[in-house]
Amino acid sequence: MLVVGDVMLDRYWFGDVDRISPEAPVPVVLVQRTEDRLGAAANVARNVAAIGAHAGLLCVIGNDDAAERVIELLAQSSVECFIERDADLPTTIKLRVLSRQQQLLRVDFEKWPTHEALLAGLTRFEAILPDHDVVLLSDYAKGGLTHVTKMIEHARAANKPVLVDPKGSDWERYRGATLTTPNRAELGQVVGRWKSEEDLRERVERLRSALDLEALLLMRFEEGMTLYTDAGVVTESAHAREVYDVSGAGDTVIATLAAMIGAGVPLVSAMRFSNRAAGIVVRKLGTATAQYSELFPDALQEN
C-alpha cells in the first residue's frame, strides 16, 4: 500500500486541573504526562501496517525536531518512508491538552509546503508507483496533495486502485479515483443537504457519474457506513456500542479498506472489515489503530 498525503504529529499533554488562573478565566493544567502519535496520512500508514499489510508513506515534512519524531514513530510502526524535506516547512503539529480524558485545548502549528518540495514529491511518486499495489491519498488540506490529479492519472494508467480520503468542496481534483471515503459533513459540502435516503442516493450517483468514481463509501460513524457502486447501495450498521473518540476513525477505515482490496477481498466484504475496524478504534482515545488480533480474532484462535 502506498499512502500519500499530509502528515502531522499529534502531541498530547495530559494533566490535572484544580484551579483557575488568576491571570484569566481559564483552567491551569499541571501536565503529568506527554505522548506523541502519528497523525493524518502517517496514521493511515500506521493503520495499514497494524493489520499486517506492507505500508509505504510518501510525504513532505520539515527539518525540525517534530520531523525527526515522525520518522522515529514511523520506524516503530514498520512503515517504509519516502520523505521529501522542506527546510522552510515547520512539520505540522496538533497539540492537545487534556484533563480527566477531556480535551481542554488544541493548538495547531502548520504551514504550506514549497512548490519545489511538492514537485519533488510528484517525481518520487512516479518512481515508486510500480512497486505498490494500491494507492491511498489522504487529504487534510495542508498542501501535501497539491498534485493529486496527476497522481490519480498516473496510478489509474498503471491499473492501480486509488482510494481518496477527501477534503473540501472541490472534488474535480479527485476525478477518476476508484473510491472516495467522505463523512457526512464532507459529502454535504459537495452534494448539498439531502432530504431522504433516496435523495442522497440520487445525488451520490450524479456525483459518481460526473467525476468517473467507481465507488463512494459514506462514513456515518454511529450509524455505520453506506457503499454506493454500480451494483447498488449497501449499508452496514455501526459495530461500536460506545463511541469514545472518533478522531482518526476515517484513517482506520480507508487503511483497512485498501488492505482488503489489495488482498483481493471483494469491495462489500472489504467495507464490512473496515466497519469492524472503525468500531474498534472509536473505543480508544485519540488517533489509534485496529490491530490484526482485534480485527481477525477467529484466525488467531484457529492457529
Image (tube, helix red, strand yellow):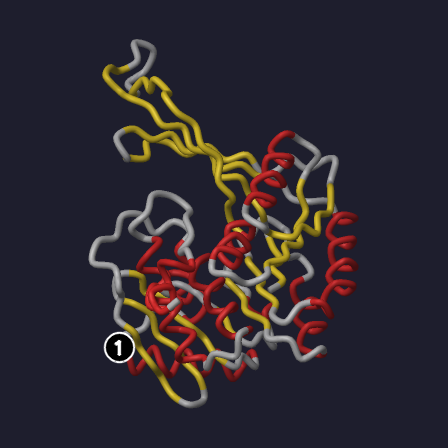
Q: Position of residue 98 (x, y in %)?
A: 33, 31
Q: Residue at x 23, y 17 (%)?
A: 18
Q: Is residue 141 above or below residue 173?
A: above
Residue 286 quadrant: top left
Secondary structure at badge 1 equals: loop
The image position of residue 140, as x and y in percent, is 53, 52
Q: Residue furthest bottom?
A: 231
Q: Residues within 10 Å of mark 1 (few under 14, many from 20)?
A: few
**Residue drawn at (73%, 52%) of the image:** 118
**Number of marks:** 1
Q: Is residue 134 above or below residue 36?
A: below
Percent of width and height locating residue 76: 56, 43
For the C terminus, the quadrant is bottom left
Residue located farthest toward the top when viewing the structure as drawn: 22
Q: Is residue 27 left or right of residue 247?
A: left
Instruction: Say which quarter of the image contains residue 249.
Output: bottom left
Report the residue marked by disc 1.
Answer: 196
Left or right: where 86 falls relative to 69: right
Horizontally, residue 65 falls left or right of residue 154, namely left
When the figure is inspected, residue 259 is found, relative to residue 56, above or below; the finding is below
From this viewpoint, which residue is outermost toward the front? Answer: 303
Please, what is the three-letter code of the amino acid marked with disc 1?
Answer: Ser
Q: Position of residue 37 (x, y in %)?
A: 48, 40
The residue lying toward the viewer, choosing from 211 and 178, is: 178
Q: Residue placed at 34% from the left, 17% from the top? A: 30
Residue 298 placement: quadrant: bottom left
Residue at (66, 42) in percent of width and height: 61
Q: Is residue 261 left or right of residue 300?
A: right
**Quadrant of the rendering where the N terminus is positioned:** bottom right
In this rendering, the answer to whether 185 lies above or below 289 is: below
